Image: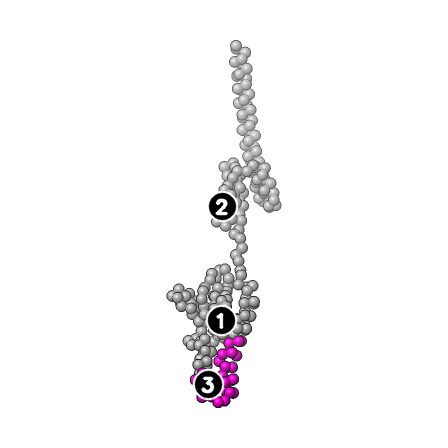
Amino acid sequence: MDAGQGLSTSEVQSIREALAAGRKPRVVFTAAAGQIAGQVGQVIELTDPEVSDEFVVVRFGRDELPFSPADLAVAPKGAGRRVMEPKPEPEPETPPAVAAPEFVLDTPRVPAQRQEEPKVEQTEKPPARRAVKAVKPKGPAGLTVTLAYADGEWTVAAQQGSKALAKPYVVKPAEALKMVALVDVPGVQEAVEQILGTERAEAEQQAEKLRAELAEIEARLAELREAR
C-alpha cells in the first residue's frame, strides 16, 4: 500500500465506527509524519477536528500522540506483525549450536535488541516536535455592546456569545451622545443629534404649554382670593 497518501473522509468515518465498536484500527505513518514514516500504530481516539487539525490520537510504542489525517494511512493487513515474526525463528536453532559460541552471540542481535532500540529513539523525538502544534485553545466569545433608541428612551445592553451580561437599561441622552462620540462616525453622530434635537423641541413645546396652563390656573386662583 502507498503510505504517501493521508486518510480520506470515508476512512476517518470507518475508523470512528471501529472505535465505537471497541476496536483500535491500525494505521501507518505517511511521509508527512517525518522520521516515523512507514511505522505502524493504533488509533485509540478521535478528538474534535474543530479544536485541532491533529485530532487522530495514535498509540505508538509507549506514547499516545495526536496526528492529522494527512500524517496517516490505513495499515495493510498484517502490518505491524512482520517485525515480531523473526523472534521465534532463531530460538529453535540455538540448541543444536551449543558447541559453537558464535551462534549464541549472533542470535540476540537481530530479533530483539537492534530492532527494538531504534523504535524507542523514534518514539521519543516526535513528542517534542508536535507538543506545540497539539494545543490550539479557542479564544473567548465575542462581546457585543448595543446602544438603542426606542419610544423616547436610550438603552444600553451587553452580551458575550449567547450569554446576556447586562439586560437593556435606560441611560440619559447626554450619556448616549458621549458613547456615540467615541465611535467617531459622522453619519451616526448626525443621526443621534437629530433625534436629540427632535426630543428637545418636543420637550420645549410641552414645557411652554404647561407654563400657559399654570398661568391660567394662577390667574384663576388670584380671582378667587380677591372674592373673599
For label 3, the SS is loop
Within the magenta stretch, is there residue 127?
A: no
- Residue position for label 3: 94
Q: Nearer the viewer, residue 158 or 21?
A: 21
For mark 2, what is the residue?
A: 164
Q: Name the kind of residue labelled 1 in the image.
A: Gly
Q: Considering only order in the chain, which callout, 2 or 3, is on the residue closer to the N terminus?
A: 3
Residue 100 in the image: x percent, y percent? 50, 89
Which stretch is magenta?
A: 91-118
Relative to residue 132, is residue 148 depicted above or below? above
**Number of the front mark, 3 or 1:** 3
Q: Is residue 92 magenta?
A: yes
Which residue is tagged 1? 61
Residue at 49% x, 83% y is 107
Within 10 Å of the Cα at label 2, are there few (<14), some (14-19), or many (20+) other Cα atoms? Answer: few
Of labels 3 and 2, the one closer to you = 3
Gap in angstroms between the C-alphas marked 2 and 1: 48 Å
The picture places residue 150, in percent across and down from the top left corner, at: 50, 39
How far is the residue under mark 3 from the one under mark 2? 77 Å
Given the image, on which type of amino acid does mark 2 rest?
Ala
Please state which of residues 23 and 119 is positioned toward the viewer in this rendering.
119
Q: Which numbered disc flags the more N-terminal residue, 2 or 1?
A: 1
> Which residue is at the front of the view, 94 or 28?
94
Q: In the picture, residue 75 is in which quadrant?
A: bottom left
